[in-house]
Image (cartoon, coloured by chain):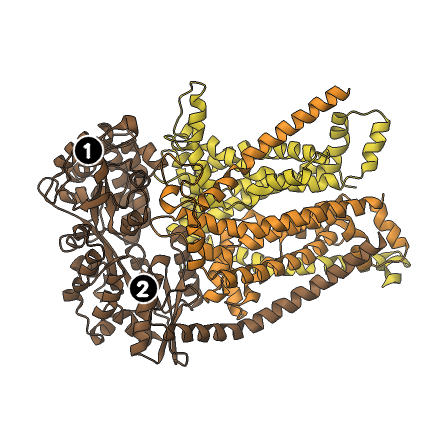
Chain colours: A yellow, B orange, C brown
Amino acid sequence: MKSALTRRPGSGYKLADAMWGYFFVAPVVIGLAVFYAFPFLQNIYFSFCEVDRFNRSSFIGLDNYREMFGSAELYQSTGNTFLYVLLTVPLGIFLAMIVAALLNSKARGQSAFRTLYYLPAITMPAAIAMVWKWIYNGNYGVLNEFLKLFGISGRNWLNESATAMIAVAVVGIWSMVGYNMVILLAGMQGISPSYYEAAQIDGAGALACFFHITIPMLSPSIFFVLITSLISGFQVFDTIYMMIGKTSLAYESTQSLVMLFYRNAFDYGYKGYASAVSIYIFVIILLFTLIQFVAQKKWVHYE
Amino acid sequence: MNNGHRTSRVILYVVLCSGVLLTVFPFIWMVLTSFKLDGEAVQVPPTILPQHPSLQAYQQVFDVIPFRSVLLNSVISTVLIVLGQVLFCTMAAYGFARIKFPGRQLIFILVLSVLMVPGQIFLIPQYLIVQKLHLLDTMGGLVLPSLFSAFGTFLLRQFFLSIPAEMEEAAILDGANRWQIFTRVMVPLVQPGIVTLVIFTAKYGWNNFMWPLIITTTPSKMTLGPALSTLSGVHVNNYPAQMAGAVLAVIPMLILFIVFQKQFIEGVAHAGVKG
Amino acid sequence: MKRFQHVNAKLLTAALAGTLVMTSACSSSGQAATTTAGTTAAANSSDSSNAGTSAADTTAGNSNATTKLSFMIWDANQQPVMEAMAAAYTKENPDVSIDIQLTAYKGGEYWTKLEAGMAGGNAPDVFWMNTLHVENYVDADMLAPLDDAAKTAGLDLAADFPEALVSMYKINDQMYGIPKDFDTNAVWYNKELFDAKGVAYPEAGWTWDDMVDLAKQLNDPDNGVYGIAAPLDFQTCYYNTVFAAGGWILNDDKTQSGYNDPKTQEGIQIWIDLINEGLSPSLASLTDTSADAMFESGKLAMIWAGSYMTPEYLDNEVIKDKIDLVELPTYDGNEANVINGLGYSVYSGSKNLEAAEAFAAWMGGAEAMKIQGESGVVISARNDAQQYFAASQPSLNLKAYTDKAAIATALPVSKVASEMYDVEANSLKLAYGGEMSLADACAQAAEQSDALLAKMNK
């Protein structure tokens, strides 16, 4: 083994190394193939079928796709989802960066702050929805009470198309900051202090250090946070589903793509149609991810 | 200079503290609600502090849920999922980040694509696979699909990619094979990443809901998530009981996070020695 | 540094070994654990006459029973009484043991689990069924017809149960669910708010106009108190008045919706008028703060509510001693009430089909229905057991619910009911919110619903 890897350079060396590569990735790849890729392929097939609640399918060709692309609901939900991503992802990463940078600057009580900022990530979604609904409540909400202090009259935040999406996006940002912060902070802690020491000797200030050392060195972590935030933004479901009731006048203007998928698959039992919606969601996310993977070459610094 | 330094410190803490207030408010609300009586929880306008602090909600949780067995099942399944993911994802991440092999990019994108479809589509097919393996209603079936994670692989791949190549090359010159390089050189260097994965995976395994719900049928094998959901009725919610359940469920995660973040800093300190 | 690396290598190897060993150990010992847990629980509950005091205690029956039935339910509040009924059954039938599984209804969890089991061919033997799902399940051949088992158990479906309930589970002339319980609607009122204004409580025989008059006297928006609430709730609120006004929602052969009928619209418009006159909070306000929450906080004088809300209101420390109820007011001289109910169904693929059918039928018998009724949680479906619900709270006029089963109309359902309810809510909320006239909203609902029905009947 030892000699194959190091002592005999040439084609044999590469082959051995490639075998090592397959060895390392095999467990995850095989596991994902069995439990995820296979169901996914079946899902593609189902998108061309009528499938009932009990997984019984009959082939109907492109009917699901025809119906899907013919429904105004799809375009409305797509627009809503894009808006949500636009509102939450940039700000959610930006704020997480700030908090992580502040916590990385050896603030006293750093570990306490970190735990507190992580709390939203481990708070039960039902509790999160319940509290935010109270905050936004048009009659008794804290937010309206607060605005009243400044003589601004409140609104029914979750019941008006103009405000509901913003209200939901605030909760989305709120939930993702702590999560992203943990990843970014882990990345920051991995940056060797020697870089900063060298920069300080050169007379660089804190901001210069942040932009010229932290951001480039952290870019693999930022890239990870960006991709996963985009994916979870495009798949937003829980918070909207729990906060916006069916009788809200803002229901249509906040319904996300995954809500559309979920309603068809689980409320109505149209699993074939829902499969087509899930393929549509997949293609959108795949496109954005591929764009990011191409674009990363310009800004992500790998060692 | 010194004065300016102090001002910026003060600003730093003001910013951090106000952020914390915003962030922890729902959590505090959850705890306060768990001490309210059922009627008070839905009262308008809402009360902040419980008017008649009561442990009734906790009593209800223990009445409805066989808490000890549920807790034990959750701990076992979470530990298994964390161990499995840490091992498999670290390996795969290293392979994808550091070893060149034909099809690497493509396989990696395929791995990632698992994250791109709504997770609910996997539910029924996975159920049917686990049924074929005769693992319904077993711990094996409960943890098996969760041992493999695209998210974890991607996370650690990014950490491996940020490690300088010289570290590895030195080890190759010393005559170490890939496995030795992996375990002795690379894994210690990505420790912050592994700790992050442990924290996220533990949370995922702990809160896992739909999967344990459909594959366990014997009450004594149920885990915390599905058990807690039985506290909600059809027409009405018993909020205090649900929140009490959530508080009980969150405590182990909180302890884990506090313990591990100490580990996390020490790990970084150790890794720093290398430089 | 060196030592640290070493530890990590060990950790990883240990993780690998640990995962494999524990996974395999758990899956093999899992099998053993099932049987042990099952028998211990069974022994426990056959010992105690009052089964179900502890939640772990979910198996009823003899530990050496030859036939094991699984029975899935969704309401934790009813688990103790279901256990008591199962225990009574296994006492009479020592060769059977019954394993109760509780899965929550909220979020569709119950149905997802049931449907996954059916897709794989191993669902619970007996389970609760509701009218929203029964047609789809029958259509997919997932339910066993229960007519023969009912006859063997001595049930006379036509005579023993309200007609509306039986009709819900009778599909293609076969019975697919033994009626379990039902719910009807009534008006609850807060006596304290009535007393404060010196207004007399409503009495049976009152009319819609009486209700509006009372609401006007009780209304006090400055103090956040409303006389009545008009939430966008079909089953509890506007279907009742639609039927009283002579309107309809779905025709008998389920081919057309009735939203365009002026009488249907009349039954809905009177609710919108309550909002427009300021007697009820706005739709937006009721979406933020439910009518139930308002009533339970003493901010609402009267509320229309289904019988299933009874335990909730009576558990509430704030209002439980200040409330009573009265039957729905008549509209246009007519009384109407919407009835809906659950049934016990049997999985057609059950490995113990005969035993499962026998148990389901027994659950509709006088003995079982008496145990259920005396719990006071729900109204037992059997005519001779309905009295127990009212008797469980003698100080309250719960007869306002039970008395109406005979005159009630079944909740309109079809295979596309979930979608129709959504279509209806999406349109009507525009009328309730004042963004569209009711006639236009109904036209929109009718067009979309009729398209759904056409697709269903194709």
Tell me which corner region of the image, top left, top right, bottom left or bottom right, holds residue C114: bottom left
Q: Is residue A239 visible?
A: no
Quarter holding the C terminus of chain A is top right
Give, as a three-letter code, the residue at label 1.
Ala
Using residue A18 as the reference point, say whether residue B241 is left or right of it. left
Looking at the picture, do discs 2 and 1 lie on one chain?
A: yes
Quarter holding the N terminus of chain A is bottom right
Using residue A172 as the reference point, say whether residue C165 is left or right of it. left
Q: Closer to the camera, A232 or A291? A: A232
Q: Chain of mark 2?
A: C
Which residue is found at the position 45% from the left and 19% from the top? A150
Where does residue C201 sit, x and y in percent of width and height? 15, 39
Q: Chain of mark 1?
A: C
Where does residue A117 sit, x and y in percent of width and height? 60, 39
Q: Residue at the far left: name it.
A: C333
Where does residue A106 sit, x and y in percent of width and height? 73, 35
The local secondary structure at tag 2 comes to: helix
Give, as a three-letter code, the residue at label 2.
Val
The vertical placement of A293 against C274, above or below, is below
Which residue is found at the position 48% from the left and 30% from the top? A166
Which labelled disc corresponds to residue C215?
1
Using residue C158 as the reference point, say whether residue C81 is left or right of it. right
The vertical placement of A112 against C99, above or below, is above
Residue at label 2? Answer: C81
Q: Closer to the camera, C88 or B97? A: C88
Q: Closer to the camera, B274 or C356? A: B274
Where does residue A235 sit, x and y in percent of width and height? 52, 43
Q: Residue at the far top: name it.
A: A151
N-terminal-most mark, 2 or 1: 2
